[in-house]
Every structure is written in structure tokens, then in C-alpha cells.
Image (spheres, helix red, strand yellow):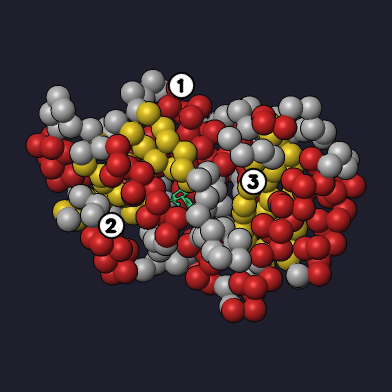
Amino acid sequence: MHIFSQIGHVKAYLKEQRSSQSSIGLVPTMGALHAGHMSLIRASKSENTRTICSIYVNPAQFNNAEDLNKYPRTPDEDIRLLREAGCDAVFRPGDQDMYSYNHPLTFDFGALDKILEGEFRPGHFSGVALVVSKLFHIIQPDHAYFGQKDFQQFRIITRLTEELKFDITLVSVPIVREANGLAMSSRNIRLTEAERARAVALHRSLILTRDKLLQGEKFPDITKEVASLCNQHQVKLEYLALADRETLVLQEMVTDPVRLVILIAGWVGDVRLIDNLFLTED
Ligand code: AMP
């Protein structure tokens, strides 16, 4: 497996790999890799001749300096997992490789980046869009793989790809969960055993919301039940929302179940977690 930190080196490698038959898959990550990331690598390997994983904890997408400092970093284990998964190359740039100026460019996605995560993490999606644009320009992949776990992020990157005319096919990969339903996340490393057990309240809230909506209960009533479920598990609920899967426009009631996704965010101790669930499976 090739490991690159310099942009020039990774570009030279990819130039050699490109041919009329080849196809390059990119899996952008922030490291502290887990089985969720590995399912993205597998998806890429099944569709491309070369898979490249980027590992970069992008300062521009953190609206909170403490969150950036505490973000888990497990570089040796990441390399071991990627080798084991048969990843072809890793791109691990430093801040000086990715950012030339102290004031990063900013993006504005209108309503799409003001709701949900955008409301609670101002500037987050601007930073995500910036780093993904840089990675797309540097790597120029044929396919790029993202997890359904960051649902709003996928919508933002879809818009970015359309607007900036990137010739890249985006692929959304289903959420990988722990046996108890907790969505895998690099941030889970920071949970104590007790917090990990309490964190299942997020997934349970999604299931409860889905089941009750499908039984015809009203969303505002369900929100109250979810608030109390989260309370019982000492999970500080930030939002529970129902939205259109394509436009992310927030909904108050179920009109067409196949179009809807339920999204949740909450704090377990000092760790912020997100999760989501489609109202009906595809
Ligand atoms: P991150 O390293 O957290 O920035 O995540 C890198 C990519 O992995 C993103 O596209 C995430 O949506 C995806 N990802 C993170 N957790 C999971 C999971 N549990 N299942 C599937 N994909 C995931």
C-alpha cells in the first residue's frame, strides 16, 4: 500500500495508474477508522481498479477548537486496517499541504446548510465542502464514497459536485452499526462503557419514531416521547427531525413514506453523536 503526504507525489502516482480501463475510487475520512469506513473501502474496491483513502482531520470543518483537539487519532491502526482491507493508497496531507492561507474560502448552500447540523455547527458544511473540493481536485476520482451516517453531508456534497461540475459519481453507503444498534463513529472511542450503553437511546429513538409514524402517530407527539427516552438515558437531545430524503426540507407529517428520513443528534457526556433512519427501506 502506498502512503503519500505530498500532493505532488499522490498526483504522480495517480497519473501512472490512470488508463482507459482504470477507474479510481476515493474514500475521504478523518481517520480513527472503524468497520463503517471499511465498508466504504469494500464498496470502492468492488467498483474500481484502484482505491485511495484520504485521512485528514480538517480544521476548517470544526466550529469548536476543543472538538478538534479531542478528535481521536489512531494513525498506526488506520494503516494496519487499510492494508488488511487491500486499499491501494493512502493520502495523509498535513495542514500546510491543504491550506495556503489563514482565511479559508467559504461556501454558502442556502437553506441546506442552515438546518440540522448546520444550525448547531455553524460553518461546518462550508469547511466540509472546501476540503472535499480540494480532495476532488487533487485526486480526480471516478467514484467517491460517503456514509449514509452523515446524511446531510451527502446532500451538501451532491450539490457541490453538481455546482462545480465535478465529473465524479457519488456513492452513499449504508450505516454500519454495533450489535446494539449504535451507529459506528470515530467519536465512539471517547465514550466510557456506561456512555456507550446509554448512547443506544439515539438508535432506539429513531426506531420508535419510525414505527409510530408508520402507525399514524403525529410527529410532535412522538418528539415528546423521544425527549423522555433520551432523558432516561441521560442523552441530551439536540434535534429530532423528519425530512425529505432528496431536498432535506423538514416535514411535520408523513405524506409519502419512501421520501422521508428521520435524523437525530444528541450529546452523551461530552461526545456529540448523530444518526438517521429511512422511514421505509429501499
Ligand atoms: P469521518 O472519518 O467520520 O469523516 O467519516 C468518513 C466517511 O465514513 C464519511 O463519509 C462517513 O459518513 C462514513 N462513515 C462514518 N461512520 C460510518 C458508519 N457507521 N457507517 C458507514 N459509513 C460511515
Location of residue 237 in the rendering, given as x and y in whole percent from the top left corner: 75, 58
Tag 2 and tag 1, C-beta contact below 8 Å: no
Residues 30 and 42: in front is: 42
Q: Which residue is mark 3?
A: 277
- Of mark 2 and mark 1, the one earlier in the sequence is 2
Q: Residue at x 69, y 43 (%)?
A: 262
Name the mark nearer the viewer: 2 or 1.
2
Q: Which residue is mark 2?
A: 85
Q: Residue at x 90, y 47 (%)?
A: 221
User: In this rendering, does residue 199 appear at all?
Assistant: yes
Furthest toward the left, the residue is 16
Residues 91 and 255: in front is: 255
Location of residue 110 in the rendering, given as x and y in whole percent from the top left corner: 62, 28
Q: Quadrant of the C terminus?
A: top right
Report the disc number at residue 163: 1
Position of 228 with respect to 171 (left or right) is: right
Q: Residue at x 81, y 69 (%)?
A: 232
Name the mark nearer the viewer: 3 or 1.
3
Position of 10 with respect to 75 (left or right) is: left
Residues 163 and 218: in front is: 218
Q: Residue at x 62, y 52 (%)?
A: 275
Position of 31 with respect to 20 (left or right) is: right
User: In this rendering, does residue 79 appear at all?
Assistant: no
Mark 1 is surrounded, within 10 Å at the Cα level, by few (under 14), some (14 to 19) or many (20 or more) other residues, namely few
Q: Amino acid at mark 3?
A: Leu
Q: Quadrant of the N terminus?
A: bottom left
Above/below status of 274 relative to 172 = below
Give how far apart the Cα atoms at labels 2 and 1 are: 33 Å
Mark 3 is surrounded, within 10 Å at the Cα level, by few (under 14), some (14 to 19) or many (20 or more) other residues, namely many
- Of mark 2 and mark 3, the one earlier in the sequence is 2
Give how far apart the Cα atoms at labels 2 and 3 are: 27 Å
